[in-house]
Amino acid sequence: MLDASALLCLLKNERGSDQVISALPRATINAVNLSEVYAKLVDAGGSEQKIMKAVGALHLKVEPFDAEQARIASTLRLTTKAFDFSLGDRACLALAQQRRATALTANQAWADLPNKLGISIEVIR
């Protein structure tokens, strides 16, 4: 499961992007995280057309944010509050937990999450 930070790392060709590239064939992103990526790129001055083209070329599987993920994300709020996690962060973790998959992120704070979450996390840098 790609966190927004991991996809942004790839799109900006930053350190750690090679790990994202190798995960792409099996990667999934939550629609909330994809929205976050679009917003960050627009904020950086990207045009909608260029952003859509760059993201579309990756052929990512995009999962809707469903009621079960909303429930899981809300239960993660208390555990992640000290880390100042956004809804997008918790949406990625919720999808990873729901699918029993690894969450791929560039956010170093995720490495400090308590093991009791039962979510596999890989920090790419």
Image (cartoon, rainbow, N blue to C red):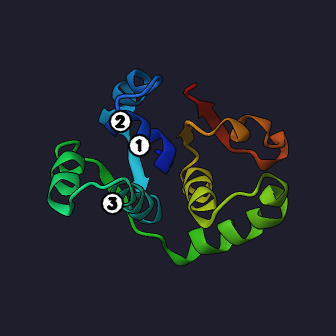
In the image, residue 65 sits, relative to residue 115, either above or below, namely: below
- Ranked by sequence position, the earlier of labels 2 and 3 is 2
Q: Label 3 is placed on what type of residue?
A: Val
- The percent coordinates of residue 115 (x first, y second) are 82, 39
- The percent coordinates of residue 2 (x first, y second) are 46, 45
In the image, residue 24 sits, relative to residue 86, either above or below, namely: above
**Residue sitting nearer the eye, 104 or 84:** 84
Which residue corresponds to mark 2?
12
In the image, residue 26 sits, relative to residue 117, either above or below, namely: above
Q: Quadrant of residue 122?
A: top right
Taking the image as shown, residue 3 lies to the left or right of residue 24, namely: right
Taking the image as shown, residue 38 lies to the left or right of residue 98, namely: left
Q: Quadrant of residue 107?
A: top right
Taking the image as shown, residue 64 lies to the left or right of residue 125, namely: left
Badge 1 element: helix
> Which residue corresponds to the image point at 55% horizontal and 55% vertical from the top-left?
92
- The percent coordinates of residue 41 (x first, y second) are 35, 54
Marking on residue 42: 3
Q: Quadrant of residue 79?
A: bottom right
Residue lying furthest front in this view? 45
Marks 2/3: CA–CA distance? 13 Å
Residues at circles 3 and 1 in contact by the CB criterion of under 8 Å: no
Q: Sort mark 2 into few (<14), some (14-19) or many (20+) by Cα contacts within 10 Å.
A: few
Badge 3 element: helix
Marks 2/1: CA–CA distance? 6 Å
- The percent coordinates of residue 38 (x first, y second) are 35, 59
Badge 2 element: loop
**Quarter of the picture holding the C terminus:** top right
Residues at circles 2 and 1 in contact by the CB criterion of under 8 Å: yes
Marking on residue 8: 1
Q: Label 1 is placed on what type of residue?
A: Leu
